[in-house]
Amino acid sequence: MDVLSRRLCIEGCEPCSNAEKKFRMETDISVEALTMTTYDRWCLSEIQKAQLEDPDIRPILKKKLNSADSPSWQEIARECPATKRYWTLWNSLYLKYSALYSKWESNDGGFYRRQLILPKSRTQVVLREIHDNTSGRHFGVIKILRKTQERFYRDRLRANVEKWCRECQVCGARKGPKTEQGKSVTGRTPAEMFSDRTLRFPCDILFGRPRDTLSSPTNSEARLESVQASAGEQVKLSRERMKTHYDSRATNHHFKEGDLV
């Protein structure tokens, strides 16, 4: 309701009341409070429930809940191949509020990443958010797989990502000829080149994001210089490869005055 449509006099004015009845104006402007309750499907209790419903994860999660000792091969031999592959990661698996996680460590042990063991019922939800929504922008298999692995682990995850991207109608409709992208030359994203940080996306709010490695400004500056130097070398090598490829297809023609060209 704007200012011009508001009643200028006090309540109970007979002319205004008659005018409101004539033009059928509503005078009740009371506001009711609306209480909203949200159902968090990504709370750890719901995640544990989904993991227990997954036949591939359920045997490993139950054994983790009952004992910290790794089960013997005889106990796992009758399970499906996916469960056996989870079993090989036993020492990297741990529980957080009864939900199963995997801990991925770098080769030097200086950096680790916490990955939620993704149940089958949540796989499509995650891929839809990371690939289809604003945070994904329908990137290719490699980028979507890397973004997914920053937060989740699932057996045969790459096959799921490839299938999702292959069946995406938006990607199929706008897919053009295969050309070299900017990142394929430098090997780095623009954000990594200029700020030594990866961009944060809306899916980071929903699924969380791995913690950045803490470092001093001096180390960050040195790492940024190293990244830019490495990118420069990649650009130089790419330029040399393109020139070599062009020269290999060039032909040696000598033209004279009057020749048709």
Image: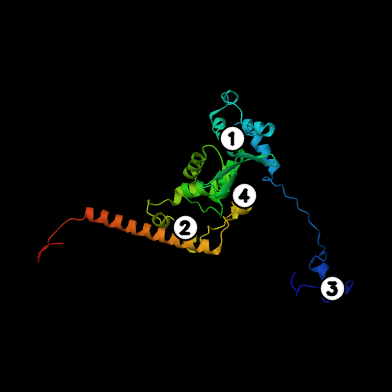
Depth check: give the residue in front, 19 or 29.
29
Q: Earlier in the sequence, mark 1 or mark 4?
A: 1
Q: Amino acid at mark 2?
A: Thr
State the SS at label 4: helix
For mark 1, what is the residue?
90
Q: Which structural element holds mark 1?
A: helix
User: Is disc 2 surrounded by few (<14), some (14 to 19) or many (20+) residues within 10 Å?
Assistant: some
The amino acid beneath tag 3 is: Cys
Query: Quick one: label 2 or label 4, which is nearer the N terminus?
Result: 2
Q: Quadrant of the N terminus?
A: bottom right
The residue pinned by badge 3 equals: 16
Helix, strand or loop status at disc 3: helix
Question: How far from the left and from the top, in percent, is residue 6?
Answer: 79, 73
* Residue 49 image point, x, y percent: 68, 37
Judged by depth in the image, the label closer to the viewer, 3 or 1, is 1
**Residue at 54% across / 47% down in the picture?**
109
Pick whichever of labels 2 and 3 is earlier in the sequence.
3
> How far is the residue under mark 2 from the one under mark 3?
65 Å
* Pointer 2 residue: 189
Residue beneath the point at 55% across and 64% down: 217
Q: Quadrant of residue 88?
A: top right
